[in-house]
Image (cartoon, rainbow, N blue to C red):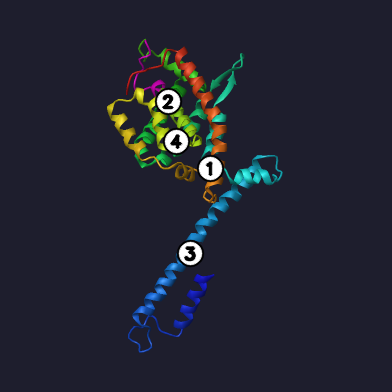
């Protein structure tokens, strides 16, 4: 290539000169020294760029091998290889939320499993980060809610080992303890309050993901619409203003998609196709979890509608 050739010419020109002896009569001039240093820096930058382009391919190969190991030990065909290599962040969300709802008990009723829900919810953190740095407060709040649920769950596990594994069992245990007031006035902090806000956050991100695929308006506009319909009715003045600033800095649709796509997908069309495809699979799974939680909170009279 051009850069290796140019660097070679420069080194050949100066190979017989004592670069480290500026007092020597045959020492190169200042501009020659500057030229060599500049060329070396440029060549190093090219190496770094090549390495950055190479590492995503290594990750792609690792995903390919993981698919082979987790499957039946057979080498997948080209279509599967292509699907593995174009996995976006939304694929992680698909995997997480597909494990949240399972049948339990003799009646075979569908219940939201606690550990899968907490793990799936954690996968949404990068969505908030992709919206922009001003979402940091919201992301931290989401992490705090997960921590609150785990704290209550750990305490119950000490008191009654093995009893609590679903969201229903956790909420019923809190309600039996009498920490909430009648009329859906939840104690705060509590697992019920944390789970209520987690459900609303999932709903909000469903709205954001729908806005990514709906190109009839800007992503910023779609995010504001989702916020106004799902979170704003329950936010006080401080949270409203925090979100207002964050949503004013929402990136373009293509930039948002690029942040959530594999690095090696350089084409905008390919990135959009990969993200849109995964989003369309993820949304029904997330909506199923939201519907289960909404019904459960209504059944247990835990739907607290007060503003935060």
Residue 266 located left or right of residue 156 = right
| Front position among marks 4 and 3 | 4
Task: Name the residue beneath numbered marker 2.
Answer: 200
- Say whether disc 2 or disc 1 marks the residue closer to the N-terminus: 2
- Say whether disc 2 or disc 3 marks the residue closer to the N-terminus: 3
Q: Position of residue 214 (x, y in %)?
A: 49, 34
Q: Position of residue 297 (x, y in %)?
A: 45, 16
Q: CA distance from mark 4 to mark 1?
A: 16 Å
- Say whether disc 4 or disc 1 marks the residue closer to the N-terminus: 4
Q: Which mark is residue 217?
A: 4
Magenta residues?
Answer: 183-193
Q: Which mark is residue 46?
A: 3
| Front position among marks 2 and 1 | 1
| Front position among marks 2 and 4 | 4
Residue 307 vertical position relative to residue 47 in the rendered view, above or below: above
- Say whether disc 2 or disc 4 marks the residue closer to the N-terminus: 2
Q: Secondary structure at mark 1?
A: helix
Residue 281 located left or right of residue 73 = left
Q: Residue at x 67, y 39 (%)?
A: 71
Residue 261 vertical position relative to residue 279 in the rendered view, above or below: below
Residue 50 vertical position relative to residue 204 in the rendered view, above or below: below
């Amino acid at each position: 290539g051009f850069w290796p050739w140019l660097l070679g010419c420069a080194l050949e020109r100066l190979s017989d000169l004592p670069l480290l002896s500026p007092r020597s009569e045959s020492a190169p001039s200042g501009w020659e020294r500057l030229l060599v240093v500049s060329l070396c820096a440029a060549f190093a930058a090219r190496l770094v760029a090549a390495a950055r382009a190479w590492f995503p391919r290594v990750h792609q190969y690792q995903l390919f091998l993981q698919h082979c190991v987790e499957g039946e030990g057979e080498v997948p065909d080209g279509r599967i290889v292509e699907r593995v290599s174009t996995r976006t962040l939304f694929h992680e969300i698909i995997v997480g939320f597909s494990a949240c709802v399972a049948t339990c008990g003799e009646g075979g009723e569908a219940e939201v499993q606690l550990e899968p829900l907490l793990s799936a919810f954690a996968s949404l953190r990068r969505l908030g980060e992709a919206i922009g740095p001003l979402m940091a407060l919201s992301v931290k709040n989401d992490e705090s809610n997960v921590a609150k649920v785990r704290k209550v769950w750990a305490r119950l596990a000490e008191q009654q080992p093995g009893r609590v594994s679903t969201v229903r069992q956790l909420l019923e245990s809190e309600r039996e303890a009498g920490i909430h007031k009648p009329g859906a006035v939840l104690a705060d902090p509590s697992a019920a309050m944390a789970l209520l806000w987690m459900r609303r956050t999932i709903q909000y991100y469903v709205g954001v993901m729908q806005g990514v695929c709906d190109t009839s308006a800007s992503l910023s506009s779609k995010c504001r619409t989702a916020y106004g319909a799902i979170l704003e009715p329950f936010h006080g003045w401080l949270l409203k203003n925090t979100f207002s600033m964050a949503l004013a800095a929402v990136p373009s649709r293509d930039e948002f998609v690029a942040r959530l796509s594999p690095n090696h997908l350089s084409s905008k069309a390919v990135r959009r196709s990969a993200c849109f495809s995964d989003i369309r699979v993820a949304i029904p799974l997330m909506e199923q979890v939201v519907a289960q939680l909404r019904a459960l909170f209504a059944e247990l009279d835990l739907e607290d509608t007060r503003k935060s």
